[in-house]
Amino acid sequence: ISEERNTTDENIKEENTKEEIITNYDKEYYINNYDININVNENKIFNITETIDTYFNVEKHGIFRYIPVEYSRDFGHMSIYNIFVEGYKSEHYTEDGNMVIQIGDGDIYVSGKQEYNIFYDMAIYEDRDEQRDFFYLDVIPTGWETPMESTSVSIKFPKKIDEKNLEIYVDGYGGASNSADANWEYDKSTKTLTIETGYLPQSVGITVFCEL
């Protein structure tokens, strides 16, 4: 009986996911795949590249990328600089604790498939723990107003990390740890963590925490 119930639950979950994916086509745009590569340096500077494969069902000027720069008291404040968007007009400014990257031209509409490649550096400062260094970042943000059909994350650390202290959160704002929803692997030889997910609903993201 228990096995039958588990199978039924999985079938229901699969059907619900299919229904959510179908609703993507009712939105103005959705994200086919969100890929992010992060190189973590010893000096708490991260070199970040994002590739956002987007599909517009209606004509739009572009997208906004909101990057939180104010975290908790313990993990300090962030600075975003060297921002570059390949192939698209862009501008950036701070607003409500975020660095906002506005991508697109007010005189030009886009539709269908668009690939946005965003490059920037992130510096962490005002870290209140002088004894230890941490990596704590929303690698896939929760602020997007549209779902994502798949995501992939690669984080290269400056030194080996202890996998037992690695925490991966896949949820909405302040949700509990749920790493079972993500496939992840840590390669000790390259000191690289890779994370992959399937469908993520609107406002659900990925947070990674570990001690360096």
Image (spheres, rainbow, N blue to C red):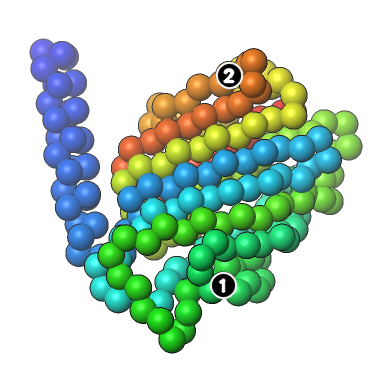
Query: Disc 1 or 2, which lies upstream in sequence?
Result: 1
Which residue is identified by label 1? Answer: 90
Residue beneath the point at 79% across and 42% down: 44
Front position among marks 1 and 2: 1
> What amino acid is labelled 2 in the image?
Asp
Considering depth in this image, is 115 or 136 the residue closer to the camera?
Answer: 115
> Where residue 88 appears, x then y in whole percent?
51, 69
Can residue 95 be seen by looking at this rendering?
Answer: no
Using the rendered view, name the quadrant where residue 27 is placed.
bottom left
Using the rendered view, name the quadrant where residue 10 is placed.
top left
Q: Is residue 36 above or below residue 209?
A: below
Considering depth in this image, is 63 or 21 the residue closer to the camera?
Answer: 63
> Where residue 194 appears, x then y in whole percent?
52, 29
Structural crowding at the residue carrying mark 1, measured as other residues with C-alpha within 10 Å and reported as few (<14), some (14–19) or many (≥20): some
Residue beneath the point at 15% across and 21% down: 7
Q: Is residue 37 above or below residue 91?
A: above
* Mark number displayed over residue 187: 2
Residue beneath the point at 56% across and 72% down: 90
Residue beneath the point at 63% across and 48% down: 48
Using the rendered view, name the quadrant where residue 171 is placed.
top left
The answer to the question of whether label 1 and label 2 lie on touching residues, with beta carbons closer than 8 A, is no
> Where residue 141 appears, x then y in whole percent?
51, 52
Considering depth in this image, is 175 or 180 the residue closer to the camera?
Answer: 180
Task: Identify the image quadrant of the N terminus.
Answer: top left
> What amino acid is labelled 1 in the image?
Ser
> Where residue 155 appears, x then y in whole percent?
60, 34
Residue occupying the far front of the picture? 87
Task: Identify the image quadrant of the C terminus.
Answer: top right
Please tell me whether mark 2 sits on a helix, a strand or a loop.
Answer: strand
Structural crowding at the residue carrying mark 2, measured as other residues with C-alpha within 10 Å and reported as few (<14), some (14–19) or many (≥20): few
Please tell me whether mark 1 sits on a helix, a strand or a loop.
Answer: strand
